Amino acid sequence: MDRKLNLVRFVSVERMMRIILARGVEPVLRELAAAIEEDFRRWEHFDKTARVASHSREGVIELMPTSDGGQYAFKYVNGHPRNTRDGLQTVTAFGMLADVATGYPVLLSEMTILTALRTAATSAMAARHLAPAGARVMALIGNGAQSEFQALAFKAVLGIDRLRLHDIDPAASRRCAANLSRYGFTIEICETAESAVLGADIITTATADKANATILTDNMVGAGVHINAVGGDCPGKTELHADILRRSSIFVEYPPQTRIEGEIQQLPRDYPVVEMWRVVAGLQPGRREAREITLFDSVGFAIEDFSALRWLARAAEESGQYDELDLLADPDEPRDLFGMLLRAEAA
């Protein structure tokens, strides 16, 4: 690839939408799920650290870095549930992919849309190993910005075609149903979480409030279901009653991070959980029997963002949907950075 190293490829929101719409949302979700699964199989090759978080009363700002030794990636992401009152997004993000050999960035991208896609793709990838065989019905509790992506990922990867929607704001459920109306789902809007989970094979919780909430109580969860817990992703923010956790086989991304941020923050620090990469790599079983309750306690991890950026670099290359930013000062003589200023002044 012949290009100036100081020009960094940039995928804007507009470019991202063009890439997704040209390829199709469901094919993109399948491609992302495959890319994430591939990197989960080589999990041991990555640097791993819990994300660096700055918490405030209003929300959290985080950095999520990782490297596989050849490429390095990081994501900047926030979580501010109160933003919606001012017409702002709860979550925004951008990310960068760099070459480890030179340290030079090669891709800078919006990741608000990409994070929603990779979160949904990760959920569906995990559910392929954990959900009951023949699952067709999903209850979706919390119908905010993540909901349509989750629904479409489970359709694209698992064949889910019936949705039971519930949100404390009925308008959010109506909007979600309208947005998904052309994708072939049978959709029912439910007045309560209890009615939404009735008869569901998979329960996805994706609420936004930064609080210890009880979206699901123990009596609402029957044998054999798979729970995809997406909303709990920082200290003091949970969605499930602890009794549900004690009845479930729990699968997580990176235990040191999930024990701080996930549903399992409610349990003792030594409570046994299974790392999801070990299931994907075939080292431990996922679902073992029909009546087992499986729980994917998903908080999001940097390797998933790495996978998404790796996928995007290829998609941008194939489509030409990127701009180039003059981001790096790169003088002809590497040791003469000040001379670069003088030559610019003379010019």
Image (tube, rainbow, N blue to C red):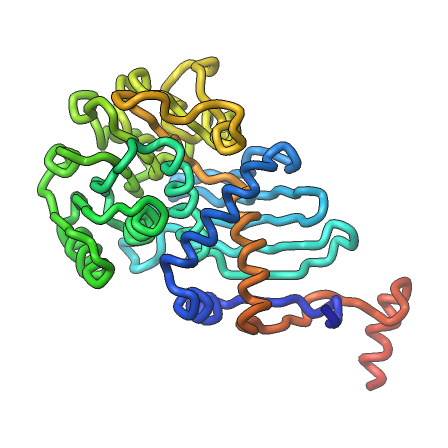
For the image, the number of numbered tags is 0
> What is the x, y in percent for residue 34?
48, 47
Q: Can residue 53 be seen in this view?
A: yes
Q: Can residue 145 be seen in this view?
A: no
The correct choice, above or below, for 283 with respect to 147 in the image is: above
If the image is split into quadrants, where does the C terminus sit?
bottom right
The answer to which quarter of the image holds residue 134 is: top left
The answer to which quarter of the image holds residue 197 is: top left
> What is the x, y in percent for residue 322?
56, 71
Residue at the extreme front = 134
If the image is split into quadrants, where does the N terminus sit?
bottom right
Left or right, 70 with reference to 59: right
> What is the x, y in percent for residue 30?
42, 52
Residue occupying image coordinates x 49% and y 26%: 275
The correct choice, above or below, for 261 with respect to 95 in the image is: above
Residue occupying image coordinates x 27% and y 54%: 85
Left or right, 101 with reference to 209: right
> What is the x, y in percent for residue 140?
23, 42
**Is 83 in front, or is 115?**
115
The correct choice, above or below, for 202 with respect to 11 in the image is: above
Residue at the extreme bottom = 347
Residue occupying image coordinates x 19% and y 24%: 222
Left or right, 137 with reference to 145: left
The answer to which quarter of the image holds residue 164 is: top left
The correct choice, above or below, for 129 with respect to 269 in the image is: below
Residue occupying image coordinates x 24% and y 59%: 183
